[in-house]
Image (cartoon, rainbow, N blue to C red):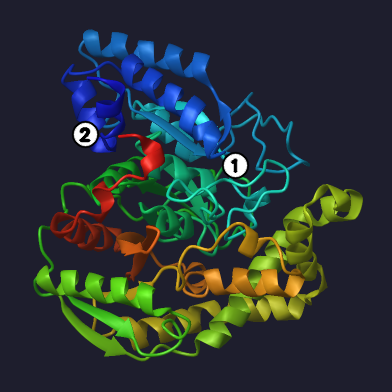
Amino acid sequence: MNAAEIARLGVVALADAIAKGEITSEDATEACIRRLETVGRRINCVIRIEADEALEAARARDRERHQGTLRGPLHGVPLAHKDLFFRAGRTVTCGAKITRDFVPDTTATALQRLEAAGAVQVAALHLAEFARSPTGHNDHFGPCRNPWDEARVTGGSSSGSGAAVAARLVPGSLGTDTGGSIRLPAAMCGVVGLVPTRTRVSAAGVMPLSWSMDTVGPLAREARDCARLLRVIAGRDAGDPLSSHEPVPDYEASLAANLKGRTIAVPDAWFYEPVTPEVKACLDASLAVLRDAGARVVTATPPNMALIDDVQHVVREVEAATVHARWLRDRPLDYADQVRVRTEPGLFYSAVRYCEALNLRAPILKEFLDAMLAKADLVHLPAVPVPVPTIAETTTGGAAAIAAVIRLIGHCTRHINYLGLPVIAVPCGFTPGPLPVAFQLVGRPFNEGLLLSAAAACQARTDWHTRAPAVAGV
């Protein structure tokens, strides 16, 4: 199997090929490293390649397989992740100057679980500074470039994850999402991004942005791949007191071929207001596919989304400012301007305002569920309401213009983290360029299985996820 053939394999396909002895983990890992060194450097999606350690681990996985032992469902599969997952004794930059040389003494629970399942980590991937940009902007490590058009943003903050998976550098990656940071790069790069229920996956050992909203999840090309990754990383963890005791199902085994008997709600306010005609055409096509899969589509009126926008902003910014308070005081000039000016306002909200925003979460969640999911199984939303913007459009034109673009990009994503609901971004076409477009599906708490089934049903009827950017060379 040559390098191009390996690159075309997703997580599940590659794991199966390694388990059957059709390819070695060492060969797969070497192929990923070569692509990360060439294509990855070209689009600047890589912070660090761990070639020696990865090849050593891959050879160990191959020895284990020859001895008849498979560690788990990811045995020998090379993966790379956003560079804010701690690994004991390894540098974790968090995409920032301040933490460029940070070496933690603990390893993120999610990484521990991937390793226990047999995965091999080959690289740490680009991200927005401290996960603080929906575009992927990073003054310290330079812009990560969209593999479909290198003049355009990847989306952020899990920018390297979206770009690396789309460019076929690795079959899957972990990211984090606080207001769209998995879904935006997935949508802008044309891959699947799954954000589980907030308490479904441990966030222990992950650099926090907003601890009550940060969510760990996978990015991959297929829903089935995300299902396998989620099954591995989900579950209760004593290291994260917010993690749930809810049992972890076999998401992959429960994937359904159709959506018969399911109802999908489409909002008639707020979410579609800034959507451009070319993006809406792709979204309409995705609804047609969902209908073809057997779903009934209805309209529903969302609650006061402007209120949710306000309170989620308070929670996120106060928690972010709490994390960064000492550095904002002692090292303010070591932040990029975009990051500092978005973080400092959190220092000035009162404790009363923050507590009000927290206390409103439960009643607002109930209101959203009653309005959108009382008579439906899933909610269909745009992911990014406009075509993928250029890097120049998100970095020039003055602070007010940049802030307006940033708010527009996250218009359809940032509320869901405050509510803590599971949500998935799924490719649904291209605007001229071509530039990827995606939709979101939101479910009830712990209903990740249905989200994955709906995404898989769409992918069984379309080929958007099979298309690779030219830079991938496969």
Image quadrant for the C terminus?
A: top left
Give x and y (percent) for residue 61. Answer: 33, 16
Give x and y (percent) for residue 120. Answer: 41, 25
Locate residue 35 relative to residue 28 in the image: left or right: right
Locate residue 465 relative to residue 238 in the image: left or right: left
Front-most of 474 and 70?
474
Pointer 1 residue: 84
**Label 1, residues with CA under 10 Å away: few <14, some 14-19, many ≥20:** many
Helix, strand, or loop for circle 1? loop
Quick check: 433 above or below 103?
Answer: below
Q: Which disc number belongs to residue 13? A: 2
Give x and y (percent) for residue 370. Answer: 35, 86
Mark yes or no: residue 353 visible: yes
Image quadrant for the N terminus?
A: top left
**Which callout, 2 or 1, points to the residue nearer the camera?**
2
Mark yes or no: residue 249 visible: no
Give x and y (percent) for residue 414. Answer: 52, 70
Residue at the spot 30% in from the left edge and 50% down from the top edge: 248
Quick check: 76 above or below 176?
Answer: above
Q: Please, what is the three-letter code of the amino acid marked with disc 2?
A: Ala
Of callouts 2 and 1, the N-terminal one:
2
Q: Please, what is the three-letter code of the amino acid marked with disc 1?
A: Leu
Quick check: 351 above or below 174?
Answer: below
Helix, strand, or loop for circle 2? helix
